[in-house]
Amino acid sequence: MMRARLLGRQFRDIERSVRALPKRNRERLGTLTLREIGQASRSDFPHLYGTAPEARYLPWGQGTEAGYERACSNNAEVALRGIALWLAVAYHETKNSPHASLQPQHRQLMQLLRELKEVHGSGSRSGDTTSNWTQESAVA
């Protein structure tokens, strides 16, 4: 339950930061997030992406904390990369979680990712941008 509260608080800050971004930066964030989700998917334990190997046996990874710290940076590039890391790790952590308290966070996260996908798609010139984004995610 404490983990759900922490992720919920961090999510509110991350969401506020995403919504404050100009459209061009949101498009870029969509690309970065897509890349991070893909890289995490290729790791042995996607929910531990961004966690040091020696901390592999902690109940929760350190990726969300690292991403959140970076997201609070005054440097725009560091902040964008931190948001992308946080979104990717939180996605994998909440995706198939057996903890019912994390399901609302996953739904909120999916809504924000869907919005990023739509912005990413509107910046693209291809026809079906939603399926392209999903395919890129699977490949990445």
Image: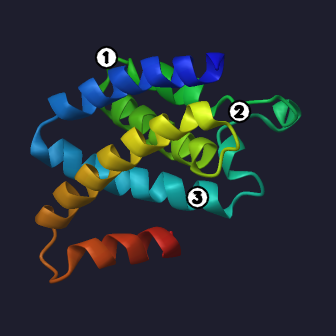
Q: Residues within 10 Å of mark 2 (few under 14, many from 20)?
A: many
Rounded to the nearest angstrom, the CA distance separating label 3 from label 2 is 15 Å
User: Tag 3: residue type?
Assistant: Gln
Q: Residue at x 58, y 43 (%)?
A: 94
Is 128 in front, or is 104?
A: 104
- Residue 68 position (above or below residue 63): above
Residue 58, image x, y percentages:
83, 28
Snapshot quadrant of residue 62: top right
Of badges 1 and 2, the one in the foreground is: 2
The residue that label 3 is drawn on is: 39
Left or right position of 35 against 45: left
Helix, strand or loop status at disc 3 = helix
- In this orientation, which residue lies closer to the viewer: 16 or 108? 108
Q: Residue 124, relative to residue 36: is it above or below?
A: below
Q: How many marks?
A: 3
Label 1, label 2: how many angstroms apart (C-alpha)?
24 Å
Q: Identify the mark nearer the N-term, 3 or 2.
A: 3
Q: Which residue is mark 1?
A: 74
**In which quadrant is the N terminus drawn?**
top right
Q: Residue at x 45, y 41 (%)?
A: 87
Q: For the residue labelled by badge 2, is the local secondary structure a helix, a strand or a loop?
A: loop
Q: Give the mark nearer the N terminus: 3 vs 1.
A: 3
Q: Nearer the viewer, residue 99 or 44?
A: 99
For marks 1 and 2 on the same chain, the one whose residue lies earlier in the sequence: 2
Residue 118 located left or right of residue 90:
left
Disc 2: which residue? 61
- For label 3, count other residues whose C-alpha is less than 10 Å away and answer few (under 14), some (14-19) or many (20+): some
| Eye-nearest disc, 3 or 2 | 2
| Amino acid type, callout 1 | Asn
- Where is residue 61? Give x, y as percent: 71, 33
